[in-house]
Image (cartoon, rainbow, N blue to C red):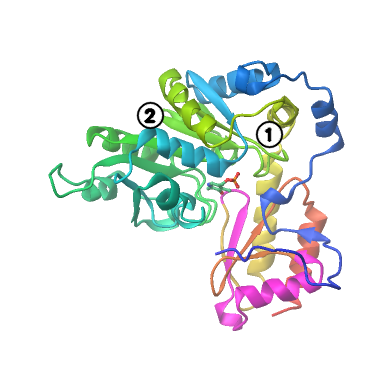
């Protein structure tokens, strides 16, 4: 798991290349200008025109009836589960899924559901695995009410679920009486990498959300989409959790700006990730999982340097990467990382192992 960088150790040199996460982007000057110009109102009372515009745009983009603006992706997952499931239900997701491994146990603490982790390469499971995990309804079994996919799979290596697999998983889930949820934190990365419209990927999913802070460069915000009835019921949870906003349009404006200016350019991040992967693969002892999108996972075991130690050494050289396991490291490209910085990072890391 990621070692959260709290405050950097005193005396750390400035960060020159930040590959820790695609959440590390700072809003650009043009994005800030769009935020300053936003028309705003009280969202809770339905009076923020910029949030309404963002929700309309996202519903159209993902092919759903309705959408809801939330502060974070984690809150999208929490509210989606609160809306689909009841305490005591079983949710099926990949064993590495963010909703299971990286949300502080929120599904247990706040949803009261049990998530069963499914197996499969690269953070993905298939319809046969889902069908095998489906239980017969009985007095003994937990009610299975939801299947979750993660596009792209974060801890699977930023991998893109193929359209055919998304469809067959959704059909299988529905055939077994389960609803379907897509954690689309990096859905636009998947759409750009595969050349498939996001709405086609989301088809068959009863709820889907996009994060605006993962490479799209907004300071906060995520949008949860679904049927009008689903969003209506989700709004009760948004209100209950204190997620109803006031003049939130100032942040929705950053998300609208990102949709206009930061989606097509994700292709640059993917090209930079490939360059980074090729550079790292040239370092003796490092094994790289070739990236499909903007996340580059690599293994340091043959160098005998743990990922955490490598991250600490890199940080001392002004390069930030993440440690995701004992010998598993992650480097992410995003809009604040140039090709020159990628090359600089490869050189620095080569000198550390
Ligand atoms: C980051 C992430 C989340 C949580 O989103 P936040 O906006 O950080 O709360 C959920 N799922 C996946 C796959 C993620 O990468």
**Mark 1 sits near ligand 1, with its Cβ under 8 Å away:** no
Residue 53 is situated, as x and y percent measured from the top left of the image, at: 65, 18
- Of residue 347 and residue 30, the one placed in the foreground of this image is 30
Residue 181, placed above or below residue 247: below
Packing grade of label 1 (10 A; few <14, some 14-19, many >=20) is some
Residue situated furthest bottom in the rendering:
304
Residue 340 is situated, as x and y percent measured from the top left of the image, at: 82, 56
The magenta region covers 292-319
Determine whether the residue tagged by mark 2 lies in a helix, strand or loop.
loop
Foreground mark, 2 or 1, reads: 2
Q: Label 2, label 1: how many angstroms apart (C-alpha)? A: 25 Å
Residue 299, placed above or below residue 195: below
Quadrant assignment for the C terminus: bottom right
The circle on residue 204 is 2
- Of residue 178 and residue 242, the one placed in the foreground of this image is 242
The circle on residue 264 is 1
User: Which residue appears at 50% of the width and 45% of the height?
Assistant: 160
Locate residue 215 relative to residue 108 in the image: left or right: right
Determine whether the residue tagged by mark 1 lies in a helix, strand or loop.
loop
Q: Quadrant of residue 186?
A: top right
User: Which residue appears at 83% of the width and 71% of the height?
Assistant: 12
- Of residue 211 and residue 16, the one placed in the foreground of this image is 211
Locate residue 147 relative to residue 272 in the image: left or right: left
User: Which residue appears at 72% of the width and 35% of the height?
Assistant: 262
Residue 4 is situated, as x and y percent measured from the top left of the image, at: 64, 63
- Whether residue 201 is visible here, answered yes or no, is no
Query: In the image, is residue 295 part of the stretch drawn in magenta?
Result: yes
């Amino acid at each position: 798991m990621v070692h959260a960088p709290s405050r950097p150790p005193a005396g750390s040199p400035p960060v020159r290349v930040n590959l820790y996460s695609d959440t590390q982007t700072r809003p650009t000057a043009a994005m800030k200008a769009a935020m300053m110009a936003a028309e705003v109102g009280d969202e809770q009372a339905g009076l923020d025109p910029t949030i309404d515009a963002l929700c309309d745009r996202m519903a159209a983009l993902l092919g759903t009836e309705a959408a809801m603006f939330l502060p974070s992706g984690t809150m999208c997952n929490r509210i989606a589960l609160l809306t689909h499931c009841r305490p005591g239900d079983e949710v099926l997701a990949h064993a590495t899924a963010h909703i299971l491994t990286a949300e502080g146990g929120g599904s247990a603490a706040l949803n009261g559901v049990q998530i069963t982790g499914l197996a499969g390469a690269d953070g993905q499971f298939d319809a046969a695995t889902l069908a095998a995990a489906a239980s017969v309804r009985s007095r003994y079994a937990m009610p299975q009410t939801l299947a979750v996919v993660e596009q792209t799979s974060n801890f699977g290596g930023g991998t893109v679920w193929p359209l055919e697999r998304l469809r067959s998983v959704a059909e299988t889930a529905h055939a077994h009486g389960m609803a379907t949820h897509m954690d689309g934190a990096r859905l636009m990365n998947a759409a750009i990498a595969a050349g498939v419209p996001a709405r086609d990927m989301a088809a068959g999913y009863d709820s889907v959300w996009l994060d605006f802070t993962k490479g799209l460069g907004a300071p906060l915000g995520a949008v949860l989409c679904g049927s009008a009835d689903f969003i209506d019921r989700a709004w009760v949870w948004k209100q209950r959790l204190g997620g109803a906003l006031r003049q939130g349009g100032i942040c929705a404006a950053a998300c609208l700006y990102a949709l206009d200016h930061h989606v097509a350019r994700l292709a640059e991040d993917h090209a930079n990730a490939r360059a980074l992967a090729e550079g790292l693969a040239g370092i003796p002892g490092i094994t790289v999982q070739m990236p499909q999108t903007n996340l580059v996972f690599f293994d340091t075991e043959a160098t005998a340097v743990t990922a955490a130690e490598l991250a600490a050494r890199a940080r001392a050289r002004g390069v930030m990467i993440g440690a995701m396991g004992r010998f598993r490291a992650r480097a992410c490209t995003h809009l604040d990382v140039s090709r020159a910085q990628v090359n600089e990072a490869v050189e620095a890391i080569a000198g550390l192992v």
